[in-house]
Amino acid sequence: MVEKTRPNLNFILLCDDVRQEMGGKISLMGIFESIYATSFPAIHPKLAIVNEWADGIGEFDAALRILSPDRKTIIRENVTRLKLVNARYRHRDVSIHLNIEFKEPGTYWIENYLDGVLINSVPLNVIHIKEKSFH
């Protein structure tokens, strides 16, 4: 029987874009915690989510869900099959979500599941602002 050890979710990062560089490095652009919109429903053009799973052994189904503020309505869902060959191996899962519609301001949720078990929830605040501000 093959040993199976559930991995840890080391981090979850939200950003504007992710790029694979020469030599295998990953570059993250525009890391953020909140989205700002002047009107609703609001369309966010691109959301990249990066999860790192490590310290586990075996094959697992990892699901990522983006939920509305009621925590019942699933806006997006991705399922990935992880294969961790030893405890030192890391799996970085990158999911790109284009044109997500946020119907109203509020706290949306990003949930990560491993083999159907909720591992963590991260808030994504969608905030109504009166006008665009430029930096």
Image (cartoon, grey):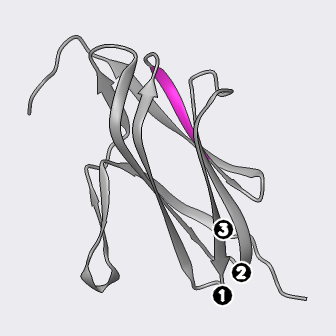
| Disc 1 element | loop
Relative image position of residue 75 (x, y in whole percent): 56, 33
Residue at the top extreme, as displayed = 130
Identified at 45% across, 16% down, the residue is 104
Do the CB atoms of the residues marked 3 and 2 lie less than 8 Å apart?
Answer: no
Q: Nearer the viewer, residue 69 or 9?
A: 69
Do the CB atoms of the residues marked 1 and 2 lie less than 8 Å apart?
Answer: yes
Quarter holding the N terminus is: bottom right
Q: Which mark is residue 81?
A: 3
Gap in angstroms between the C-alphas marked 1 and 2:
5 Å
Does 85 lie within the magenta span? Answer: no
- Circle 2 sits on which residue? 57
Q: Which mark is residue 86?
A: 1
Tell me where residue 65 sits by quadrant: top right
Residue at the left extreme, as displayed = 135
Q: Which stretch is magenta?
A: 106-111
Relative image position of residue 10 (x, y in whole percent): 54, 64
Q: Amino acid under label 2?
A: Ile
Relative image position of residue 60 (x, y in whole percent): 72, 68
The first of marks 3 and 1 along the sequence is 3
In this view, 87 is above or below 80: below
Magenta stretch secondary structure, dominant: strand
Indicate which label's residue lies in the foreground, 3 or 2.
Answer: 3
* Residue 113 horizontal side relative to residue 103, left or right: right
Gap in angstroms between the C-alphas marked 3 and 2:
13 Å
Identified at 68% across, 27% down, the residue is 72
| Disc 2 element | loop
Gap in angstroms between the C-alphas marked 3 and 1:
16 Å
Does 110 lie within the magenta span? Answer: yes
Identified at 63% across, 21% down, the residue is 70
Tell me where residue 25 sits by quadrant: bottom left
Q: Amino acid under label 1?
A: Asn
